[in-house]
Amino acid sequence: METGKKKLLIIINPISGSAHREYMPEIVDNSIDAEQYTHVVRFTQGPGHATQLAKAAIEQGFYGVIAIGGDGTINETASALINSNVALGIVPCGSGNGLARHLTIPIVPERALKLINDNHIEALDYCTVNDVPFFCTCGVGFDAAVSEKFSQAKKRGPLSYAKNAILEYLTYRSEEYVIKTPESETTEHAFVIACGNASQYGNNAFIAPKASMQDGMIDVTVIHPFKPIETPLIGLQLFTKQIDKNTNIHCFRTKELSIFRPKAAVMHIDGEPRMMDANLNIKCHKAGIKVFTPTTSTRSLLEPIENGFYDFINAIRAELEI
């Protein structure tokens, strides 16, 4: 590698999301500033490989590791970089892209890559559940059940997610949980318990609309069982950052909490299903990971429109399998 330039490792998940990845190395070459950086591209070969690659990058003195993929790929990469001096770059190419959307990172890959050239890095919070890191959200209940079904689906994208959510809703039964924080202990009969480091699941579904990744706090949203007739209102509030206004929903903030449930079961961690113990200990770790983020001047007023158009195209691709 050339000397005097910062080294970047580019990790690409070749099967994430709904768009093809064969042209991504060329897009990287055309977008990363060659005057400032040198870069190496690596493709993941299976679950956990992104973590291995990112750990090696720390040992080899890389300046940054750029993860190109969905929230699962981002989680694997970021998990290796916590409490290190190596910065995480995010190029969202998944189905939900919740972390990127929270940070206002463009969904269009070329634009996400070009913001790396600004070299604007911030220290952000991350969280753990039973010592497993997450960066966006984790949760138990209905959303965990949907994530398990979605992970088994042949098609990805928001339309596939909506289909799986509707089918799961028809048979899902809420459970009883004990929630303990340093300040209180409550028993909740809950449809969903979501713990947010960031504000949304993805696709602009804001489960914790006031969440910040720089306050050292977890935003917890407890959705109680509701009648089918109430579903449209909750859906509307979820996508308009108003879910904390619903009287059927309990929201609070804490540095840590424990959730006790009837038995070990699946929960979702950054959108990916994972079998976890009955007892869950969740903590926020302040300023524990460095991330390339947009500067104020790079945030475009047109970005929501551009991202929406890009999402629409990818949703059509997923349905047509192209």
Image (cartoon, rainbow, N blue to C red):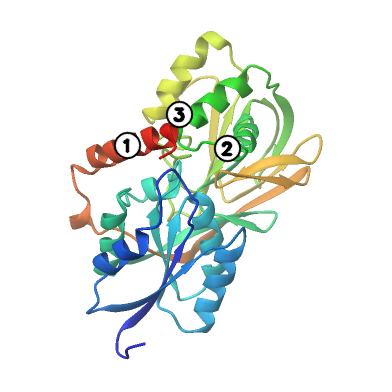
Q: Secondary structure at mark 1?
A: helix
- Indicate the quadrant containing the C terminus: top left, top right, bottom left or bottom right: top left
User: The residue under label 1 is which amino acid type?
Assistant: Ile
Q: CA distance from mark 1 to mark 2?
A: 29 Å
Choose between 197 and 215: the one closer to the eye.
197
**Residue 273's image quarter?**
top right
Residue 159 marker:
3
- Indicate the quadrant containing the N terminus: top left, top right, bottom left or bottom right: bottom left
Circles 3 and 2, Cβ within 8 Å, touching? The answer is no
Decide if residue 250 is on the left or right side of residue 88: right
Which residue appears at 51% of the width and 53% of the height? 135
Which residue is the site of mark 1?
Answer: 313
Q: Secondary structure at mark 3?
A: helix
Q: Is residue 26 visible?
A: yes
Q: Position of residue 256 (x, y in %)?
A: 62, 50
Category of crowding for the residue at label 3, using alpha-carbon neighbours closer than 10 angstroms: few (below 14), some (14–19), many (at least 20) = some
User: Foreground mark, 3 or 2?
Assistant: 3
Which residue appears at 56% of the width and 11% of the height? 228
Q: Position of residue 233 (x, y in %)?
A: 44, 16
Which residue appears at 31% of the width and 64% of the height? 26
Q: CA distance from mark 3 to mark 1?
A: 12 Å
